[in-house]
Amino acid sequence: MDQQPPAPLETITEDWERALCVVAHPDDLEFGTAAAVARWTGQGKRVVYCMVTSGEAGIDGMAPDQAREVREAEQIESARIVGVDVVEFLRLPDGVLEYGVPLRRAITSVVRRHRPQIVVTNNFRESWGGMSLNQPDHIAAGRATVDAVRDAGNRWVFHDQVEAGLEPWGGVRQVWAAGSPRADHGVDITDSFDAGVASLAAHRAYIEGLGWADFDPAEFLEGVSRAVGSRMGVRHGTAFEVFSLTWGD
Ligand SMILES: [Zn+2]
């Protein structure tokens, strides 16, 4: 065997107070990131969620108008479990989300309102690593989030928002893409792992709708977080690809 073990992960910085998580769908944060959020809110940090769509096309046996309502409620509950009490829904179309200026504009407004130092999004690379393809909404939302973070700091981009009273915000230091195959950093979630499991389990209707007969949130998250943890010398970990927005980092 000459296979190299996966590279060790550097520890993510925690010297910040406010984070904003922007993802395409309800449940995107719960497939790995929620336990990290529970750790941060436990440290007294403020974390806000923004769902770009309401995941209304995510349940095969349920029409979008009903699914939107069910999934928003499940997301609010799953956020509450990890200490997040603000969940915004942009209600853009699930499944056919388009990367572009309108999406950047919508996310820029959220960044300017909440003024985070760290923005968390999902993996927006083509794949999750190996053969497993990423989904187009994730790619669109993640790319637009990175761009919106820069747009938010420029008063002349989406200037109508500034004229309407939203100050530019250039204070985001890093964007973290969770679950990226190019992850280079991680956080120890050993102590908040159970909250992460409960947060995923809160997506009950969605999980039932997947039709994965024996899906067990604990078992699933255990598999992912153990593999990450082994690259950090801890029991459970969550991995991120870090994009720096400041010079010299
Ligand atoms: Zn998703």
Image (tube, rainbow, N blue to C red):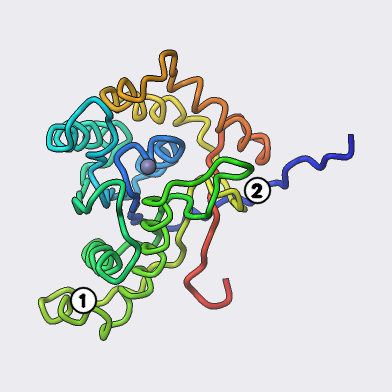
What residue do we see at 33% from left, 49% from top?
24
In the image, taking residue 241 as reference, residue 206 lies left or right, namely left
Left or right: 66 as drawn, with respect to 42: left
Kind of residue indicated by mark 1: Glu
Determine which quarter of the picture holds residue 200. top left
Q: At 42% from the left edge and 39% from the top edge, which residue is drawn?
A: 39
Residue to which mark 2 is pinned: 9
Tell me which amino acid carries mark 2.
Leu
* The label number, if any, that marks residue 123 in the structure image: none
Which one is nearer the viewer's eye here, 16 or 60? Answer: 60
**Within-10-Å neighbours for mark 2: few <14, some 14–19, many 20+:** many
Is residue 218 depicted above or below 84 in this figure?
above
Quadrant showing the N terminus: top right
Q: Position of residue 249 (x, y in %)?
A: 57, 71
Where ligand 1 lies, by image quadrant? top left
Q: Which mark is residue 167?
A: 1
Above or below — where is 226 with respect to 211?
below
Secondary structure of residue under mark 2: loop
Q: Residues within 10 Å of mark 1 (few under 14, many from 20)?
A: some
Residue at x 41% of width, y 26% of height: 197
Hey, which residue is sitting farthest right in the picture?
1
* 205, above or below 177, in the image: above
Between the residue at mark 2 and the residue at mark 1, the CA separation in whole angstroms equals: 36 Å
Q: Earlier in the sequence, mark 2 or mark 1?
A: 2
Circles 2 and 1 in contact, beta carbons < 8 Å:
no
Residue 36: where, in percent of width, then height?
44, 40
Residue 111's image quarter?
bottom left
Q: Residue furthest left?
A: 164
x then y, percent, for residue 195: 38, 28
User: How far from the left and from the top, in percent, is residue 179?
Assistant: 52, 45
